[in-house]
Image (spheres, rainbow, N blue to C red):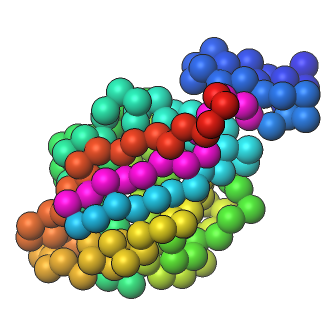
Amino acid sequence: MRWAAVSAVICAFFFGCSTTQTGKTSSLPKRVVIETDKGDIEVELFVDEAPKTCANFVRLVRQHYYNNLPFFRVVKGMLVETGCPRGDGSGGPGWTVPLEITSHKHLPGAVVMERKMGQEGSHGSQFYICCGRLPKRDGKFCVFGRVIHGMDVVKKIENVEVEVYFIGGEPFHKPKNPPKVLRIKVIEEKGR
């Protein structure tokens, strides 16, 4: 069986999406709005390049998984991160997603799935939005979307006051008053 067919079966079985004859993913929304206590961030999802990642993300969104989760990590000039139910970067839904490397780079506004140390796939729920260019991460993390409206909101989150402490010799930047994702809503296309 060819990889495209295997991928389609996996996607349909686990995530409820399907692929067309051209291999493109259907039935997945292409946009979401991340509503935060600092404002709204609209994101375009790269459903054709990262179908498993996008399907997993949309599944969690529809289950209200991200409601009221904090941005638990904020590194000025680099990224803002959310998606941990424990609020400290140690939690998740209990699974990983196969790593899908797309053609997109770690540029400001890129939306990227985190990876856990020592695991082959992407994290099941934690994601970050790039505030700067992060070339060392290109080709190692799944860039599955991009901000199309609301980078001013990302900047507000990026500029909150943080405290820095060390975990295993690495600095961790935790907001003193973490901004929150109120909810993420799917933007359904007309005619679906």
Judge whether 33 appears above or below 129 on screen: above
Residue 134 position, x and y percent, is 53, 77
Residue 28 lies in the magenta stretch: yes
Q: Report the front residue among 67 and 84.
A: 67
Q: Main secondary structure of the magenta part?
A: strand
Percent across and percent down for residue 157 are 27, 72
| Residue 176 in sight in this render | yes
Please give left or right for residue 53 compared with residue 174 in the image.
right
Q: How many marks?
A: 0
Rendered location of residue 165, percent (x, y)? 15, 72
Q: Residue at x 24, y 82 (%)?
A: 159
Q: Which quarter of the figure is the N terminus placed in?
A: top right
Is 152 in front, or is 143? 152
Q: Is residue 136 magenta?
A: no
Which is nearer the eye, 41 or 84?
A: 41
Q: Residue at x 37, y 53 (%)?
A: 34
Boundaries of the magenta span: 25-37
Instruction: Name which quarter of the figure residue 14 lies in.
Output: top right
Give the side of residue 77 with respect to residue 157, left or right: right
Do we see residue 10 in this rendering?
no
The quadrant in which residue 24 appears is: top right
